[in-house]
Amino acid sequence: MTLREGLLLARAGEAAHPTSVAAFTRLAAAHGTPLYVYDAETIREQARALEVAFAPRFPKLKVRYALKANTNVEIVRLLLSEGLAPEVVSEGEIRAALLAGAKGSDVLFSSSSKSPSEIDFSLRNDVILNVDNLDELAQVSAAAVRSGPPRASPSGSTRASTPTPSTRSTPVASSRSSASTSTRGSPGRRTKPRRPSRDSPSPASTATSARRSPRPTRTRRPPGRCSPSSAS
């Protein structure tokens, strides 16, 4: 029987079975004690079972392994080979994932209490930051500004950065004038009526003034002399 079969017997309650005893003796002689033994085949089966259970229902599914469960680099490397991506909560776990061969852009950092140094380390290694609150968002934004311009990722693309004010500004005045010129010069298009100037009366005021009758001009009478009848 194989070494794995002896360990499976022990896990099933048959630790006193000669095959199990032989497996323990062999491992202790090779690696010493105390010793932790992980069954790679069982780990693979569990990882594949998750994919089979969820992938048909979620086409964009990404199964992640939480390194808080075990940061053993060999186990992480084994799960990476099965298509799982790392989920971490500390800089130490990020380093373990990178040491196992994970790309920084595949690592998800989802701690609720990231330190400034951990944020800086994550940005330098293209780690995905799962921001927990507005205060942390401000810290990440400030750290991103400190890190400088975008740099090329392993795939050749660059990370997006916030455009500068000179990039965002556009010549609004010149674009408007060119648009109005092309509209007037193109045949078959309706041209915009010119706005009347301030000096020329509007049609509404002209119509109003036409409807009103001019007021009569008052003339002052010259002072007349008193007649005899009025004097008596």
Image (cartoon, grey):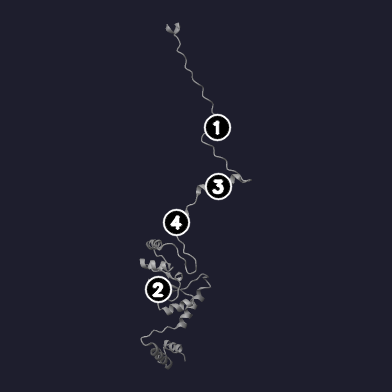
* Residue type marked 3: Ser
Residue that mark 1 sits on = 206
* SS for dot 2: helix
Q: CA distance from mark 1 to mark 3?
A: 34 Å
* SS for dot 1: helix
Mark earlier in primary sequence (1, 4): 4
Mark earlier in primary sequence (3, 2): 2
Which x, y percent locates residue 177?
Answer: 54, 46
**Disc 1 vs disc 4: Cβ atoms closer than 8 Å?**
no
* Residue type marked 4: Thr
Residue that mark 2 sits on = 95
Mark earlier in primary sequence (1, 2): 2
What numbered label is drawn on residue 178?
Answer: 3
Taking the spot 47% from the left edge, 76% from the top edge, the residue there is 80
Q: CA distance from mark 4 to mark 3?
A: 26 Å
Between circles 1 and 4, the one closer to the viewer is 4
Q: Residues within 10 Å of mark 3 (few under 14, many from 20)?
A: few
Q: Looking at the image, is 160 positioned above or below residue 166?
A: below
Mark earlier in primary sequence (4, 3): 4
